[in-house]
Image (cartoon, rainbow, N blue to C red):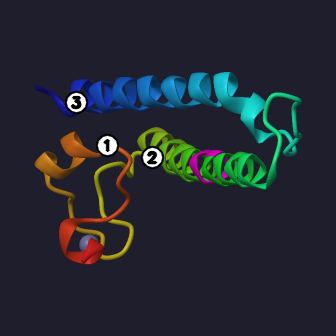
Amino acid sequence: MSIETELEAYRALLAERRAELLALADTSSGSRRPVELDQSRVGRLSRMDAMQDQAMALETARRREVELRRIDAALKRIDEGEYGYCLTCGEEIAEKRLKLDPATPVCIDCAR
Ligand SMILES: [Zn+2]
């Protein structure tokens, strides 16, 4: 496989993952609204449940944001011809590692 074909394959993977994350963010945005008590969930425990649910939703949303930024950065590196090189040491990132996580910015040694 030529370098160009390989890069396009990674670009496709990243774009697909990006679209998935954005779709997820859309469907779950409702859970990020402030906690409200509806009539069917009265009492201190259900309120705590609701707040815990919201905290989890916020954490999930935060992780999605981080992942989106990693993906955007990886796509930018593809455009700039720097994709596949470790941001820390400049060595090539192992293909196996990129296949596993196409958005990874560092090689296995620097990730440790
Ligand atoms: Zn490295």
Which structural element holds mark 3? helix
Q: Circle 1: is it few (<14), some (14-19), or many (20+) Cα within 10 Å?
A: many
The question of residue 28 being in magenta is answered with no
Q: Kindly tell me whether mark 3's CB lies below 8 Å from ligand 1.
A: no
Question: Which region of the structure is painted magenta?
Answer: 57-61
List the residue tagged with mark 2.
Answer: 74
Foreground mark, 2 or 3, reads 2
Q: Identify which residue is drawn at 20% across, 40% down.
A: 99
Amino acid type of disc 1? Pro
Q: Circle 3: is it few (<14), some (14-19), or many (20+) Cα within 10 Å?
A: few
Give the Cα distance between marks 3 and 1.
11 Å
List the residue tagged with mark 1.
Answer: 102
- Do the residues under discs 1 and 2 have CB atoms within 8 angstroms? yes
Give the Cα distance between marks 2 and 3.
14 Å
Which structural element holds mark 2? helix
List the residue tagged with mark 3.
Answer: 6
- Judged from the image, the quadrant occupied by ligand 1 is bottom left
Q: Circle 2: is it few (<14), some (14-19), or many (20+) Cα within 10 Å?
A: many
Q: Nearer the viewer, residue 64 or 59?
A: 59
Q: Identify which residue is drawn at 12% across, 47% down.
A: 96
**Residue 5's spot in the image, x, y percent?**
23, 24
Amino acid type of disc 2? Ala
Q: Nearer the viewer, residue 103 or 30?
A: 30
Q: Kindly tell me whether mark 2's CB lies below 8 Å from ligand 1.
A: no
Q: Which mark is residue 89?
A: none
Residue 61, quarter of the rendered image: top right
Reading the chain from its start, which is encountered first: label 1 or label 2? Answer: 2
Taking 95 as reference, is 25 left or right? right
User: Main SS of the magenta segment?
Assistant: helix
**Residue 1's spot in the image, x, y percent?**
10, 26
Amino acid type of disc 3? Glu
